[in-house]
Image (cartoon, rainbow, N blue to C red):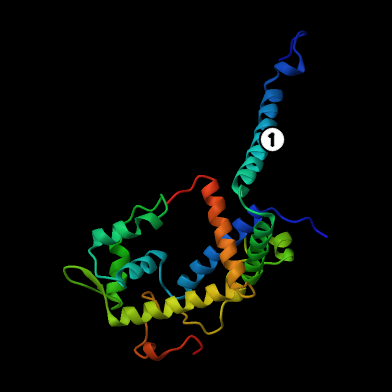
């Protein structure tokens, strides 16, 4: 219900949205400040090496740009594509080792 | 050229991928994560269920309130662990554990392929420094 004196600023929805906007801004600022705090005492060179190493590790684990766009960050691009063929599949307690297991090799 | 991604992107990505890889390796070998942890402890020395519960507690997520007993029962049934006054890893269990450990170690090697030991050490040092800067302590 509206009254002649009501303005945009006394509608609950306005303030709910304002709260949401500020929450996002504060979260962004907080994350940014955490990033700066975390980097304290780390040289640019060491930081760059760390970034490069992490990227290399991600790529070794099977990540690439296309997967990110297709499936979204962090989901569905797990190591399945990097399994070794013929690894010791199913020898755990749920699929107990056969007696010959001690002579089995990862390649067998 | 795409703008460089923030370090948080790579940290989350690598952390999640390593976790997924480890989980699927265990699953593929028919071992639960808890069983892997229990075998890890038992590979060092025999232990009671209470000692095992205490040893693996730091690795459990909040929602997990089951004891090690159920996971141990399966290991005992499979002949990987024997039970007397304490739980003890059997020769068969040790063989299996050693093999699984070798697979996990090989995967770690693949993950860091192309990264020199210096780069790896530098990265670990930086990550530790960042964690400590954010308030982490031993």
Figure quadrant of the N terminus of chain A? top right
Percent x, y of residue B97: 38, 77
User: On the rendered structure, is A43 left or right of B78?
Assistant: right
Residue B55: image quadrant is bottom left
Q: Residue furthest right?
A: B1
Q: Residue furthest left?
A: B85
Dot 1: chain letter: A
Relative to residue B66, is residue B35 depicted above or below?
Answer: below
Residue appearing at x 31%, y 77% in the figure: B78
Q: For mark 1, does the 10 Å Cα neighbourhood hold few (<14), some (14 to 19), or many (20 or more) residues?
A: few
Residue appearing at x 64%, y 75% in the figure: B114
Residue assigned mark 1:
A25
Counting the numbered discs, the total is 1
- Residue sitting nearer the eye, A88 or B14: B14
- Residue sitting nearer the eye, B103 or A41: A41
SS class, disc 1: helix
Percent x, y of residue B44: 30, 71
Residue A13: image quadrant is top right
Q: Is residue A95 visible to us here?
A: no
Percent x, y of residue B102: 45, 79
Residue appearing at x 68%, y 23% in the figure: A15
Relative to residue A27, is residue A65 depicted above or below?
Answer: below
Percent x, y of residue A60: 63, 72
Q: Is residue B103 visible to us here?
A: yes
């Amino acid at each position: 219900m509206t009254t002649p004196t009501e303005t945009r600023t006394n509608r609950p929805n306005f303030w709910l949205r304002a709260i949401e906007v500020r929450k996002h801004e504060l979260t962004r600022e907080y994350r940014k400040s955490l990033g700066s705090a975390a980097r304290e005492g780390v040289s640019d060179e060491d930081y760059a090496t760390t970034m490069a190493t992490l990227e290399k590790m991600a790529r070794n684990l099977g990540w690439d740009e296309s997967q990110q766009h297709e499936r979204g960050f962090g989901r569905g691009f797990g190591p399945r594509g990097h399994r070794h063929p013929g690894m010791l599949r199913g020898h755990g307690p749920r699929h107990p080792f056969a007696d010959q297991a001690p002579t089995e090799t990862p390649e067998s | 050229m795409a703008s460089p991604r923030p370090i948080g992107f790579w940290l989350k990505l690598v952390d999640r991928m390593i976790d997924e890889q480890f989980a699927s390796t265990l699953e593929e070998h028919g071992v639960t994560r808890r069983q892997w942890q229990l075998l890890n402890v038992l590979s060092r020395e025999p232990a009671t269920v209470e000692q095992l519960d205490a040893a693996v507690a730091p690795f459990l997520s909040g929602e997990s309130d089951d004891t090690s007993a159920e996971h141990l029962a399966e290991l005992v049934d499979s002949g990987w662990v024997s039970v007397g006054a304490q739980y003890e890893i059997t020769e068969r269990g040790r063989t299996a554990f050693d093999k699984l450990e070798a697979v996990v170690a090989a995967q770690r090697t693949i993950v860091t392929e192309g990264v020199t030991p210096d780069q790896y050490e530098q990265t670990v040092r930086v990550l530790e420094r960042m964690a400590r800067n954010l308030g982490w302590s031993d």
